[in-house]
Image (cartoon, helix red, strand yellow):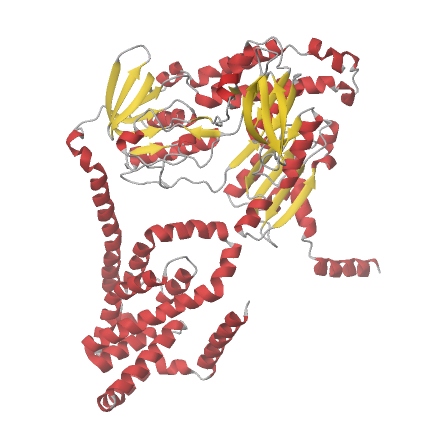
Amino acid sequence: MNLKKFLLLAAIVGAIAAFVLLDLGRYLSLDYLKQSQVEFAELYARRPLMVVAVYFAVYVLVAALSFPGAAILTLAGGAIFGLGWGLLIVSFASTVGATLAFLTARFILRDSIEAKFANRLADINKGIAKDGAFYLFTLRLVPLIPFFVINLVMGLTQMRVWVFYLVSQIGMLAGTAVFVNAGTQLSQITSLKGILSPALIGSFVLLGVFPLLARKIVEAIKKRQVYARWKAVRPSKFDRNLVVIGGGAGGLVSAYIAAAVKAKVTLVEAHKMGGDCLNYGCVPSKALIKSAKLAHQIQHADRYGLNSDSCIEDKRQSLISFKKVMARVHAVIAAIEPHDSVERYTSLGVEVLQGYAKIINPWTVEIALNGGGKQTLTTRNIVIAAGARPFVPPLPGLSEVGYVTSDTLWDTFAKLEDAPARLVVLGGGPIGCELAQSFARLGSQVTQVEMAPRLMLREDIEVSGLVADALRADGVQVLTSHKALRVEKKTSSATGGVLVVEHGGVESRIEFDQLLCAVGRVARLSGYGLDELGIPTQRTVEINDYLQTLYPNIYAVGDVAGPFQFTHTAAHQAWYAAVNALFGDFKTFKADYSVVPWATFTDPEVARVGLNEQDAAAQGVAFEVTRYGIDDLDRAIADSEAHGFVKVLTVPGKDRILGVTIVGTHAGDLLAEYVLAMKHGLGLNKILGTIHTYPTLSEANKYAAGEWKRAHQPHAVLAWVRKYHDWKRG
């Protein structure tokens, strides 16, 4: 605490001490006021300016220091100055005092509170910036919450001082008028309870509803303005309750929920049901990873006590049939396809149309059917779940030489007899790392190029380093801090090319047979009417907390909406969008991103939920780190998978979990226990007290909790316990 804060705090403590020790509260009682009413009136008649000045100063001081007695002073204002002048003086005095209390709380407490609760306050401040004035006005009108509490709490937020002052000045006026008017009849008042009768409080509550109603009116006006240019085409009846554009995870879940609650819903998909995850992402990549890991284990069979002579490097080709591996990938896709098929969703009550959808106006969708012809549907609500596509960097020569992406490689490589001899993977994110390692294990000579100084920038440095070491151990040449400049054709061959990169000001050339672009994905924002409707977009479709676009009846979910590009978050958003669209007249829900897990399926896997160390440091969140090495875990040792760790971030001195990073085999599965704990507010003590099956990998979570407990032993208490046991032995 700096000197200014210390001095101010000392002054406040001194004032409070004086108030208590000198029993100044006796002067702020109803009895004292009634006994002294005549004297105050006579003094005011002789020295009006002095009385007003002293009264104003005392009121400001009482309000600023949150002393009890503001209500008595307000009555005194009515008794001494009458209704008109009393209301004017008290109104300004109370607002000035409240603002000083607001500023004091902000000056002394806000920095420390923000340091401890940065994440929670970020959401609160976002709400304050948007609706804070309405909420403060409501609280000021309803005298159920003490005003001094409102002053102090608001000081901890980012609310602007002038907003607080103006809203308080207006909002407290009604309550102030009641008390000042009561003060003019002071002789008839026997207690403060008589002033705030149940009927009067009820009136205040009804008055407090006014700003909420005003907010609804403002929203209705804004809504009317948004839809103004479409007023003439708004249907009187609608063909559908909901039209969903896109048949990926977000679209499928939205359509499923609508059908489950008996709404009439149409799902439009232009290409393949199941979207990117089934056809190009999660499913095929995990099938490939499994085959690659098994090949790796066979090649290192000696680790398991098996004869590996037939699996030495020069016989790798006899072990791996790349064509069969790719055939298996497509077989896995085919096996899962029925889960996302047209037939299944039709049986669930969803109308599925295959074609390209375009939003004509906020209630009309036109579908160019794949089989020919068009169909136009009117709908009350629309969910956009158009997904994302791989980003292809604007490298000179790239299009001429040719490349594959995480979308196109599955069909392209399925035609190959062998894995690409020389594969360049451009990108060091999760997709690039997963695929680089897998193809290296399947026989490709892989070079991975990343412009950033390390792989997987969103993870802690030690995690990035561990993944890079694992890739290098599998034969991947990892080139970080290398910037791709251009792609050139090879003169000696009709296929493949040369990637020219720059590192430390020096250019070098990397020859390849195939180049895989894995530098990220971008939302699909064109082709279905966003521009024509004027729906704002940046990197994604702009939405509010309820997943609504500019038009409240048009929602966006999944990769096209952000902020995450995960199948599970798309499905999560889809629930909110569907429920808000279909039942928003009664209740709307804000999408909840408080606990979002994710995993990268390299070997070892990397899984995370909540904050890691670099995020916590960047956000100024205080934390403790507890770490458990999986190399100590019995099951991991038995499986020859004894590498990696569990790292838990907690609130200093407490077992509340801020975030978890797990590196190791099946890390994505192990993470689930922590996701559940964080979602429901369970700490490490609860995990430690839960029985975990032996021998399983899940014991790593229990042992991590045990490490935290060991670090927080009550040493002073244990010292006395030792003395007790010594005494018991005699």
Relative horizontal placement of residue 526, taking residue 411 as reference (left or right): left
Residue 616 lies, in percent from the top left, at 56, 48
Which residue is drawn at the image coordinates 62% and 44% (left, top)?
648
Quadrant of the image for the C terminus? bottom right
Residue 34 lies, in percent from the top left, at 28, 83
Quadrant of the image for the N terminus? bottom right
Total numbered labels: 0
Rendered position, 457 above or below 40: above
The residue nearer to you, when weighing 203 against 669, is 669
Relative horizontal placement of residue 561, taking residue 205 as reference (left or right): right
Rendered position, 464 above or below 400: below
- Is residue 637 visible in the rendered image? The answer is yes
Which residue is drawn at the image coordinates 27% and 71% (left, top)?
91
Which residue is drawn at the image coordinates 56% and 35% (left, top)?
672
- Is residue 352 visible in the rendered image? The answer is no
Rendered position, 729 above or below 550: below
Could you say which quadrant of the image residue 33 lies in?
bottom left
Residue 585 lies, in percent from the top left, at 26, 39
Residue 679 lies, in percent from the top left, at 50, 41
Rendered position, 419 above or below 207: above
Could you say which quadrant of the image residue 198 lies in?
bottom left
